[in-house]
Amino acid sequence: MKKLLLELIQKYFNQILEDWSLKIGSFLNKKLSQEKIVSFVKYSLDTFISVIQNGTYNVADQYLIDTYKLFSEANVNLLEASQIFGQARFALLNIIEKDSVDGIDPVIILGFFDELIEQIYARYGMLHQERKMKEIELDRDRLAAKLEFDQQYLKNILHSTDQAIMIVDENEKFIAWNKGAEKIFGYTESEMIGKPSNFLFPEGEFYEKELEKIINDAKKIGHATIVETQRKKKNGELITVRLSVSRLPSRTGEYSGRLIIIKDFTEFKKLQAQIDQSEKLAVIGQLAAGVAHEIGNPLTSISSLVQILQRKSKDEFMSEQLINIKENIDRISRIVRELVDFSRPPSYETTIQDITDIIKTALGIVKYDKRVRNVKFETNLKEYLPNVQVAADQLLQVFVNILINALDAIEGNGTINVSSYYDYNNVYVDISDNGCGMDESTLEKIFDPFFTTKEVGKGTGLGLSVSYGIINRFHGEIKVQSKLNEGSKFTISLPIANN
């Protein structure tokens, strides 16, 4: 992974240089000239490359001294320095999103870069503090006020971050707990101070050994990083986290505890699940296209033979059966065509469309679901609807998503109504069901990414969120009306195209 990270930085050196420089300049243009910003960023990227290649942070010592001198002369404070280094992450993230590596999790590559940035900034912070302490030694009259200011300043940083930052002493008791930790785990500072260090650990021998390794690494090598593990929240929920641990020395240099920084990794896991789901859908799409091709050719031959037999047969019973066979062949052919259409990559090019055919295609796809045997579909589609400017396959995805949700709501037994109409400005499509409905708290969240009322493994919580985004891109709206145990109605409105 480090090799891949190195290749990404080297390959997109100039692009990262430009992006990072622009981000820094947006909030530091009054303190540093653009020339100095570009010079600093280039120096930083060269240093990152050296650190990765040599496997040691010692090569960054002179860089840190020069950076501290530059920031000090420009009156860049510690919080601004943190923001400067943090912007490097977003510059690389833009690159990762554009240049994904097959088989490689972009989240892991970003994790390695996060660790690099954290270590560089931690060393800068130590240098910053050492220089400040020397200043204090030179002016002892300002010692008390300076210490109080620094403590308050660091405390503000500690409590303003959304990451969990905590300190454990040499007796394995919590002695510091910030607001980020309170937000992630649900415990207040007063509830956690004095609690044992394993208080947040899930039960089991695995986590006992993990704690033992963290303590040993902190004492022997001064730090420990665990990319993925689990911790327990106040409500008993287990969450996936990433943690970094640093040794805290006493005045004599002995081990006096450790600093722990924890990031909630849950959203990253959800992102990974989304990526996995997208890859599965891509494979299914390719398979569907292949299967459709293999089925289509024999069907054409069978259909031709049936037509020949129909022309030659004089037997009434035989003619009726041949008609039945021909209807079923046409039905299979229709399924094959729709599979091919649905498996094609999405188009982002919009065209002028009459959406009635798209609605009918969506209904055709959903009617092949095994749950529709006891479902009644009622349609009232307005003829000669005004045209709209959309990408047909993306709008098809919206209709299919909402129809499948309606099937889930009625649990395969009920009625689904689909109607279309228009006014002076918009075309409307109503999709309603008489299923379980939703309460107000659910209605407020249904378009949120990853929100789902389905069981684990049966829904990603992305269907309505993606649908909302698609309709929004077409300058339309999705509105929902629902009552618990009475059903739901989704209304999709799209602006009439200017021909």
Image (cartoon, rainbow, N blue to C red):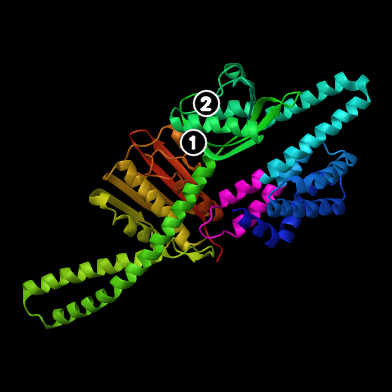
Residue 162 in view, yes or no: no
Q: CA distance from mark 1 to mark 2?
A: 32 Å
Pointer 2 residue: 200
Q: Which residues are magenta?
A: 88-115
- Secondary structure type for disc 1: loop
In this view, 112 is above or below 150: below
Q: x%, y% of residue 168?
A: 63, 24
Residue 179 visible: yes
Kindly check if marks 1 and 2 are in contact, taking CB atoms under 8 A apart as contact: no
Residue at image location 61% in from the left, 59% down from the top: 98
User: Does 432 appear above or below 205?
Assistant: below
Q: Amino acid at mark 1?
A: Glu
Label 1 or label 2, whichever lies nearer to me, is 2
The foreground one among 131 and 303 is: 131
Residue at 70% from the left image edge and 44% from the top image edge? 117
* Image quarter of residue 186: top right
Q: Is residue 106 magenta?
A: yes
The percent coordinates of residue 72 (x first, y second) are: 87, 39
Q: State the residue in front, 7 or 207.
A: 207
For residue 356, side relative to residue 67 (left or right): left
Residue 420 relative to residue 257: left or right: left
**Residue at image mark 1:** 444
As shown in the figure, which amino acid type bears the numbered disc 2?
Answer: Leu
* Residue 367 in picture, x, y percent from top left: 29, 55
Q: Which mark is residue 216?
A: none
